[in-house]
Image (cartoon, rainbow, N blue to C red):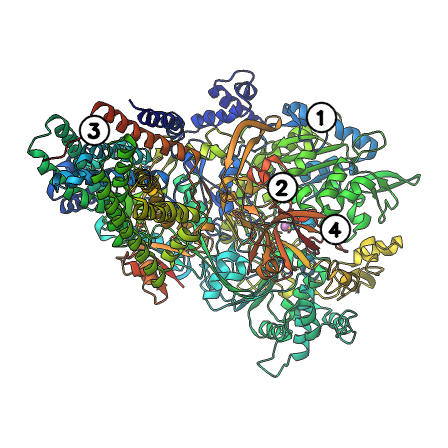
Amino acid sequence: MNRTEKILWGIALVGFLAGIAGLIQRFTGGHTVAAYGTYVPWGLWVAVYTTLVGISIGSFLIAALGEGARIRALQPLTRIALLTAFAALAGGLLAIWLDLGHPLRFWKLFLSTNPTSIMGWMAWFYTAYGILLLVLIYLQWARPTSPLLRLLFGLGLALAVIFGGAEGALFGVVSAQALWESALVPIRFLIEGAASGMALVLFLAILLGYLEPESGRFLRWTLLGLLLTVAVLEWSEYSTTIYAGIPTKVESLRVVLFGPFWWVFWIFQIGLGLVAPIILLAFLGERKVWLGTAGGLIAFTSLSAKLNLVIPALVVPELEGLRMAFTGPGLSFDYFPTLSEWLLAVWVVSVAALIFLAAYRLLPAEQARHA
Amino acid sequence: MAQETQTRIRALATRRAFLTRFASGIFASLIVPAVASGVLDQVEAAPQEGAGPAPMPELPEGMNGQHPIERMLQDLQRALQKPVDQRRWAMVIDLRKCVGCYACTVACIAENKLPPGIAYRPVITETRGTYPNVSRRFIPRPCMQCENPPCVPVCPVRATWKRPDGIVVINYDQCIGCRYCITACPYAARSFDSGYFYSDFEGGLPQPYESLPSPEYGENRVRRKDTSPVGNVRKCHFCLHRIERGQLPACVLSCMGRATYFGDLNDPQSLVSELASRPNAFRLKEELGTEPKVFYLV
Amino acid sequence: MIATRKVSRRDFLKIAGASAGGLAAMAALGSGFRTLSAHEAQQQQEAGSRVVYTACVMCPAECGLEVHVENGVVSRIYGNIHVPYNSGTVCAKGISGLQLVYSVNRIKYPMIRVGERGEGRFKRVTWEEALDYIATKLIEIKQKYGPESVIMDCGDVTDRDPYYYLFRAFGTPHTVEHGSICDTPRRHGPKLMFGGKRIEPDIMRPVLVRQPDGSLKNDYSYRTRLIIYVGWNPFTATRINYESRGTVEARLAGARIIVIDPAFSNTATKADRWIPIRPGTDADLFAAMLRYILENHRDDDPFRRYIDWSFKEYSQGWEEFEAAFRSWWDKKDPLNGLPYFSLEWAADRTGIDAATIAELAHTFGITKPAALVWGMNGIGHHYNGYVASILGTALNVITGNMEVPGGAIDTELVKSSKGGKTSGGDFLKREVTRIVNGREVKGKIEELHMDGYGDWPAAWDDVVGDYPRRFIEGVTLRYGPFRGHHYPIKAYFIRTGNPVITGSNTQKWIEALTAKDESGNYKVELVVYIDTVFLETGLYADVILPEASSLERMSLSDIYPVHPVLYLRDFVIRPLYESKTPYEICWALARKLYEKGDPDIQPKDFWEKYPTEEDFWNEALKVAPGRPNTGEPLPYPNLPKGYKLLGTPDSLEAGRVQIDDEKKEIRGEPLTVQWLREHHGVAIWPMSWKRFHGGGVLQTDSKKVEFVWDYTVEKDGKIERKGRYSKYNKLIEEAGETPPGIARLGWQKYPATFYWFETRWNPYTNPDYAKYREEYPFQVISGRVHHAMSGTQMVDWLGRLPTEDLWAPLNDERIVEEVIIGENGPTPTGRRVRIPRGTWSIGVIQMNRADGERLGLKTGDLVELETPQGFKTRGKVYLVETIRPGVLRVPLGGGGRFSPGLGKTYVFHDITPNHNALVDPENLSPIMGQPAYGDVIVKIRKIG
Ligand SMILES: Nc1nc2c(c(=O)[nH]1)N[C@H]1C(S)=C(S)[C@@H](COP(=O)(O)OP(=O)(O)OC[C@H]3O[C@@H](n4cnc5c(=O)[nH]c(N)nc54)[C@H](O)[C@@H]3O)O[C@H]1N2
Ligand SMILES: Nc1nc2c(c(=O)[nH]1)N[C@H]1C(S)=C(S)[C@@H](COP(=O)(O)OP(=O)(O)OC[C@H]3O[C@@H](n4cnc5c(=O)[nH]c(N)nc54)[C@H](O)[C@@H]3O)O[C@H]1N2
Ligand code: SF4
Ligand code: SF4
Ligand code: SF4
Ligand code: SF4
Ligand code: SF4
Ligand SMILES: [Mo]
């Protein structure tokens, strides 16, 4: 184990241990320890879940593009991308599982799936995707030459694209929340997911020290492209919204841009998540440090974009005056995660990290390029 | 009694039809066990305290049937004679009469034994204008029991659906607490039961009134930590347990301004039919196409 | 305690598995909060569910309720549909009664103070010990100072009869209700002119009316064309329950509603017109209306025929009244130089423009039937509220609106009688002897009254607001046989009242209750607090007695319907913990006094006479309905007109009656508790109108509406002095001494007809205060919040409901060490409770947005209010468009609440305003001494 790995283990373990407090609180206090409730039903954990799932898809895209679409530059990253995809998926599902009011009833998602519910479909997608990842991991390490691999990667590519979009559709179809209801949301999810997952793989590869220059170059320009697309999408989304002036939507946007958590948007999402990496990638991307920094920034700020999607839509009352109609726990339109929520989020991310690190230990990630 | 059983069977039958329609394809086989295990029809189970509609209470005699309560109770009795799928329950709230007293809010809380932080029927105060030209109205907001309820299709596990009589219900044992439906409801009519108790804020020991069973859906559940409905989403159900017994919803009965009316929209003679068809009736967010069955009079 | 109850409680203990120690043993298991297990025991005993018809006491409307009990626990509260007063409705407070019953902050056991008064340290004692302590002290006080040194104040809940009965038997005339801290100036007009109290619009529906075919039917027709509510907010201050549904129904049936209130009250939201008047100027408005009507009335012009002269048939003295009123018209107001009662004059003072006032007067004059109705804060709580009340009454009378269908009704005169002998009035007639200035004098107990024969001879409702002074100075009688008699106040019993917060200046009350004499003893030697909840006044008590909540006791409800309706308050559940019903408390105390040799308490008056609680209330029912068979349609056409009706509705209906021509009484079968139980808890006798004609229900000396209050008549060659003021004036003349209240107005005695004087602390109408206009630019008024009397907001549901811009979720986040009322009073539970920001409603200061912005304030800013006298309070401002600029409004009882018994309202006491911290303690209204809560001016300072 090299030093970097040790440090990563260390961080993950600290996070894991600290996060256990959140886990304990979640189990003893139920949902009363959280700040979400009736008016803001989804909070940090849902944001973490969507972020991790996005990362999973993004990382998987590297492997799928490399192997399925035979993009050679990406092939050295196949293995690490697969491991990242799996760990992130596991973490994401853990987050949403703990977010359920009745986690032990998760099986109902399979036994009585509602065909009209995107979330119902998602349960099956996850299962399919998770199994696919496991099979691919098995094949990749145990039968690297299996012809099945390419086929499955190809299939996975298609699945990931649909899946990444569907994740966004989960929000996009909710016409009650003006901010979500948009055809762009699924596309944004896909692009943002791709960017964050690829960025994380890039970051890890650099950190763990086996990024090949060719992969680096490819990812640099791909990421730059994706980020610019994100920028364009965000711009068009926001500007059309403001132009069209649908009051609740504008109100949500106002919350995003100038609300009490304006800094999440301006500093994290735009500054560190978009502008800084674009500059780094465009002008300093030659050097590994900057490339890695850009990757890390994109990956680690990806949560802010999700937070800014999930929460601002919900903090705007569906009906004007609800805020003052009745008061009580959970009946607040101001949401800020509680300590328990942060701790549990840290725990979930640490679990994902540990899964990755353990897998990385067990399964060597060096991957040869196909001839 | 016979009437009651019949109602139930019919409700179940319609429910099945509903399922079959959507259960085509890969999921069909998966649904069957759930239906067979009785999980799904529990919600339609008979309300407590014996079966069948309660007899009309003996009321003070009014002149020319003017007593609104008397009239609504008669409407109810008539509706209950019909099969369940021919009833269409609706509520009319006369905003000109709502005095903003919150009796309905609290009546509902007491009726359904709702915990802190849940009110099925908050009353929204809407103030307009600048001094001295101000106006204010009070808008009670129960569940709209939408004809096209956006909350229903999003539920991943079919824990919530529209009954044949139009009431959108939730099966607490089926609901996994994902809260997707909350985000989908344009009226914020769904609440998440996070698991608070009044005693959390008062002394710590369970209060007697929160240890009583809630009559919701005729299930008489006692609310305890970590068991349903804690962890579930909850909402106004038009006091199903009361109307099935021929009683008016708690909020309707208590209303200080006598501003709330209830009855069967399919019955042209009913008070609600009469009121809902008035030109001054409107519904909230009509443009969404949800077709609420709560009408407001202005 | 009575036998039956004892048995049942013992049974219940047996079931609970507790042995000799009983509840005490159970309590010992835990921290003192464990005793909730008592419910479990009761649950076992009372399995199953049942329904009880009873009456609410969460506010003085006392609506009829249908209460559901499941397994011994009160589970749901609905309105009793059989009671026409509320006709099945119930308000948020009423339903929350069940939370009050089970509140952890209930007083659970008798307690005796262990610390100093105000410290809030108590120890639990047995009833035996508590009663022993009280009885010993009472007898000692009686021997040393006389029973008149004892005050029994029954506060704001009307089922006080057992206390009245006991304390009057004990010998004190000071057995009072909260009377004079409520609204005496408001009641003054109706009281003087009709012998009544409360003018309300005829909008209680249904009303049970005799039909032309002889049958009785419930009538739902609204005939009212206009209602003017002046400083009366029935949608929020729910005292008259039917005004909530009646006002909006009447409006839909074509009535116009006008609300005159500095704040946009809930009632104003349903008005056709809201007129934001300057506080304390309602009398000015009424005077201008009357002048306008008198000046512009034309008999021959249908568009200006304001006055309905038929009022003269049932009134007397209008000419004198009118002359006295007109005599002001030529005088000029020193402040604005305008002639009194002119439109311009009123416009200058009220802040309402002259055209609006003219239109208002015209509308009221021309629209019939109509009702002009005024409330406590608008009129009852101002120094000169009497004037407004008299003018308002006159306006209703001369426009012909009294007692016409859809018009105005004095509900006091038409509601059912109740009480009778149970109020103990007979004891007050007992003759006693006192040594006054060395002379032995004889007189009746009632002639020892500190108000009626002391400083406030017109105080037909006793002057609670003036107690603090008397606690410190004692009482000197000025009138009647005991003139010159001086006695101290040594014992103060307060039941269902919280004067430290409600009875005018809080600090003054605290000073009085904690004042000590030279030897270091408290001046008021015994303070007993009898209540269900633990409010501020309890902190100053020596003994605290837990009274059964309203769902745990029996009595009759006292309400204001438009015709006789009476209903039962019944046992819904057994008293929890060790609380006792008023009857049980009084009978137990009576026994103790008797055992200790008090000569005035005799078994024949108590347990021998009314051995069970039901016997007592059956006695109280004997006088029902007690109103004459009068009006149109005649309630009982087959029975003699004008005779007083007694007995059950069914026996009267069926003619199963005895007719006493001498007494002019019709006696049916007496109404009983049992009869009520068998009839959904309620008895309803028919409605009729025109009940002033031929004497009818009027209670004045002349049996007419009186516009003069001190006049003479010749009867059998003798000259008799009549009119309500005449008996006070006789006392004054005999003694040759003017009462201080009216001496301050420059009067020698009470005027015989119309009078006028200015309110105080009002820089816009009273020249003495004009100098404060700049420095103290805000008038502070108060208003009810929907969900609270002074204590009910402590229950969770009510505390969470924001309302009327006075009670809003502006709380900051707090983590508090929880304190509840345990067996030894306020006790920390050791729990830390987090109250997140914005989840609990607190009392706020309602302020006009423009005012706030001018001062650089925003909603939620903490400010301090200070009066010229240096009284202060603080709170968060709530900037809204719903109040007149220059006026601040705070909730009554909504802030500064320093008793831990108030739960979360207590938690925020440091950032919420107490109106009575500001009120001038000396500003007692001149005739009956009620605190003038509404006359307050302040400057404002931001502090956070
Ligand atoms: N919910 C609730 N109901 C109650 C009570 C309660 O505490 N809570 N208390 C009961 C009791 S004891 C009483 S006495 C009644 C009181 O019943 P109300 O008199 O109706 O109630 P308040 O809120 O005291 O005052 C009514 C209005 O007077 C306005 N006001 C204040 N000053 C002035 C003024 O100078 N002129 C005019 N025109 N208006 C003014 C206030 O803004 C307020 O809206 O309510 C009874 N009902
Ligand atoms: N500044 C200002 N001061 C005011 C007013 C105002 O408008 N402004 N209003 C005035 C008026 S109108 C009034 S009437 C007074 C009201 O003042 P109070 O007469 O002091 O009445 P509340 O404060 O409502 O307190 C009623 C008491 O009754 C208790 N109680 C309720 N139900 C029961 C029961 O069943 N049994 C027992 N034993 N106790 C019970 C409550 O716990 C509470 O202690 O305040 C007056 N003070
Ligand atoms: S109001 Fe909301 S919860 Fe009710 S049926 Fe409509 S969408 Fe569903
Ligand atoms: S919270 Fe329950 S009812 Fe709502 S969508 Fe999820 S499972 Fe369905
Ligand atoms: S109908 Fe029943 S459940 Fe719905 S708001 Fe009214 S009381 Fe509550
Ligand atoms: S109870 Fe009636 S009047 Fe009161 S707030 Fe509810 S709907 Fe309005
Ligand atoms: S108005 Fe008063 S008496 Fe009537 S239900 Fe409400 S609190 Fe009880
Ligand atoms: Mo009062």
Q: Secondary structure at mark 2?
A: helix
Label 1 lies in what chain?
C
Residue C372 at x, y = what percent? 60, 65
Q: Quadrant of the N terminus of chain C?
A: top right
Q: Check residue A365 in the rendering and tell me which mark sits there, or answer none.
A: 3
Going from the N terminus, do you reach mark 4 or mark 1 first? 1
Label 2 lies in what chain?
C
- Work out whether C205 lies above or below C443: below
Q: Check residue C920 in the rendering and tell me which mark sits there, or answer none.
A: 4
**Tag 3: residue type?**
Ala
| Tag 2 and tag 1, C-beta contact below 8 Å | no
Label 4 lies in what chain?
C
**Do marks 2 and 1 share a subunit?**
yes
**Tag 4: residue type?**
Asp
Q: Is mark 4 within 8 Å of ligand 2?
A: no
**Tag 1: residue type?**
Tyr
**Who's the residue at 14% across and 47% down the image?**
B21
- Work out whether A173 lies above or below B51: below
Q: Is residue B118 left or right of residue C638?
A: left
Label 3 lies in what chain?
A
Q: Secondary structure at mark 1?
A: helix
| Tag 4 and tag 3, C-beta contact below 8 Å | no
Q: Nearer the viewer, mark 3 or mark 2?
A: 3
